Image: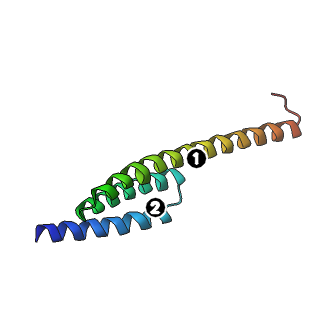
Amino acid sequence: MTELLFDALLAIALVLTALRALLVPELFRSVMLFIAFGLLLALAWARLDAPDLALAEAAIGAGLTGALLLDAVGHLRRVEDARRDRGDRQAGEDRGERS
């Protein structure tokens, strides 16, 4: 009975985490939820007696892919900051200000 309850809670957590990762507007939070989803999925594979898939999901799905997505979010933030700074400088030059 306890195992069935745990499996049901795991399935609900997987669905809710996946939906939240897709619907959240902030990229960083979405990536963190994707990583959490990968770890929950690895746990689900372990519960299904598939340790090879569980290890692959934890290493590739949550670990490697999560790290690459976090790097991409960081790169996007740097690009947005550079564009914002360039736009501020250009607006100041249009008003006759010097930096």
User: On the image, which quarter does residue 49 sit in?
Assistant: bottom left
| Count of numbered badges drawn on the protein | 2
Identify the residue shown where x is 30% and y is 69%. Answer: 12
The residue most toward the front is 52
Q: Is residue 31 left or right of residue 94?
A: left
User: On the image, which quarter does residue 15 sit in?
Assistant: bottom left
Determine whether the residue tagged by mark 2 lies in a helix, strand or loop.
helix
Amino acid on which disc 1 is placed: Ala
Identify the residue shown where x is 37% and y is 67%. Answer: 16
Mark carried by residue 21: 2
Identify the residue shown where x is 53% and y is 54%. Answer: 27
Mark carried by residue 61: none
Distance from Cα at disc 2 to Cα at disc 1? 16 Å
Which residue does the numbered mark 1 point to in the structure image? 72
State whether residue 5 is above or below residue 76: below
Determine whether the residue tagged by mark 1 lies in a helix, strand or loop.
helix
Picture coordinates of residue 39, whole percent (x, y)? 34, 54
Question: Which one is earlier in the sequence, the residue at label 2 or at label 1?
Answer: 2
Pointers 2 and 1 in contact (C-beta within 8 Å) = no
Amino acid on which disc 2 is placed: Ala
Identify the residue shown where x is 33% and y is 52%. Answer: 55
Residue count near mark 1 (Cα–Cα under 10 Å), binned few <14, some 14–19, many ≥20: some
Q: Is residue 95 visible?
A: no
Residue count near mark 2 (Cα–Cα under 10 Å), binned few <14, some 14–19, many ≥20: many
Picture coordinates of residue 72, whole percent (x, y)? 58, 46
